[in-house]
Amino acid sequence: MKTKLENQKLSIKRLKPMVMKNIAGWLMLLPTVVFAYFIIWRPIVMGFYQSLFDMQGSTMLEFVGLENYKDIITDTNFTKVLFNTFKYTGFSLLVGFLPPVIVAILLNEVRHIRAFFKTAIYLPVVLPGIAVYMLWYYLYLPGESGLLNTILASFGIDPQPWLQDAGTSILWIVITMTWQSFGGSTLMYLAALQGINRELYEAAEIDGAGMRKRLRYIMLPEIYPIALLLFIRQIIGVFQVMEQPLAMTGGGPNGASTSLALLAYKYAFEYFQFDKAMATGVITFIILVMITGVYLVLEKKMND
Amino acid sequence: MKKRAIDNSLFTGLINDMDMKNPKYKLIYICVLLILCAVCVTTIFPTLWIFMSAFKSTEEFLQIPPTIIPRSFQPHKIVEVWGMLSFGKYLKNSVIIIIGTWICSVVFNGMAGYVFSKVKPLGSNFLFKIIFFTMLMPASMNMIPLYVEFTNFPILGINFTNTYIPLFMMSAISAFDILLFKNFFNSIPTSIVEAARVDGASQPGIFLRIILPLSKPIIVVVSIFAINGAWGNFFWPYMILKKESLQPVAVMLYNMQTQLSADKYMVLMMFSIVPPLVIFFLLSKHIIGGVSIGGVKG
């Protein structure tokens, strides 16, 4: 029979490797904690904090409360920029959300040269972003020298102004974004479709389910969770669009393609008003939290 | 692995082998192929157009309307543009950035993924959740504060502009890479780690001698994404590296837009897309497999 003392000894013996394991583990995590602090956590907190101050360049002067926010929101351009940002998001969902689903379903049917199709569809994803923006900038050149206009001309259509048309420039940028990114989503949908248990199809066949029913009851439910994830990710991603208008239009013509993130960039690096730039970032953040919040609530209600 | 095995077989959902004997379905199938071919034309043609334009003579390039199929072929333009812009210098900078970024992203994210999966010290689960949650926060919010931080770092007020350190630091923490590694290490049986521990191996020793050799596939996937990402990364290098002698190819591509004639610019664009394309064609299996493994890569 073990005495109490022996039990204690035993547990200390067990405790020592436990402690060592914890110390070693946290030592290995130390770099991650340090990087997370400087790269993620501190900037988020500082963004909130400094947006409440009057700043000279990047030095904080005095606490002004919500003054920066008031200045931004009352600026005549702000509503336009906000509307533009929603336009980006809306257009990108309209233009870019369904094609990957459709292409993946088609790709799933292909028996010939599937590897080629997959490679070709994924091709734009591996190209450097800036090269893609510049490529499309040249494709969209207005006048007769642009490639798209040349192609239109061979169908007898007049040259279009493309990016220089204030009403549609956002749409053309969205098409570029879709072109570059749809391959990645397509392959994700395809992987989900390929993961479907074959027995389901066999069972469907025995039950005499046709093509439409197999699509509706076997394939779409499989895609649904990924579609949901990509939907939210697309909203969050496109709402923060900045590099594309920066490189392709500079936010023009006449501010017609300026997004919230680009506005923050301009406040910081064109007008050197870092306080307003940070406040713009916080506003973007708040809107995104609201959108995702509303979406998640709706989603939950739909599921219940 | 299992996924890829299924991938290679011809497993379809809507039109099965029986249907293919029916002429109606055969027609549908041909339509499917045609649509996919059309999609591929839209992805391949613009890319190809860069190559075709790069080799055109200046004269032909400026011609209105432009020719779609080139008539002239001038490979010497490559050498000319390379020399004129001293492209090698930018290439060298890109390579330095790539190597640093690559090492940081594999080493630090790999180590974190390993600890989160196998060592699991007290409270690490909580840390993982916090990192993951905060990484989901919009990047546009910490863009400006992060920039301010780099110009006046909270340790000794160091100014990191015109150094590569911010780029390396940013690659050292990626919730996505950590998650990839963590999921991969979860699939390695814990008994191996336990056995090594009983034999008296230290934590770093277990990681270096046992886990690392086993995790080649995941390291390959993360490396490809890291290297390709570093080559294409334009915004942060553009913000941080104001000195021209430090700038990588992607930043140069942005800056040269206004300074270079369009036909020479096409050559430059070609330079910037050739390395990713070469990597892609050599390793497309890993890359396309990686998308399926990773799932959430944007």
Image (tube, coloured by chain):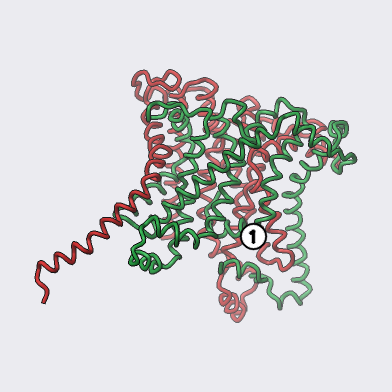
Chain colours: A red, B green
Residue displayed at 65% across by 33% down:
B90
Q: Quadrant of residue A143?
A: top right
Residue B4 in percent (x, y) is at 60, 66
The residue that mark 1 highlights is B285
Q: Is residue B124 left or right of residue A106?
A: left
Mark 1 neighbour class, 10 Å CA radius: few under 14, some 14 to 19, many 20 or more: few
Residue displayed at 70% across by 66% down:
A110
Badge 1: chain ID: B
Q: Nearer the viewer, residue A283 or A94?
A: A283
Q: Say which element carries label 1.
A: helix
* Position of B79 relative to A77 (above/below): below
Extreme residue in the bottom direction: A206
Q: Is residue A122 left or right of residue B99?
A: right
Q: Is residue A74 left or right of residue A243?
A: left
Q: Nearer the viewer, residue B63 or A3?
A: A3
Residue displayed at 86% across by 34% down:
B57
Residue A254 in percent (x, y) is at 63, 24
Residue type, numbered disc 1: Lys
Residue A123 in percent (x, y) is at 68, 51
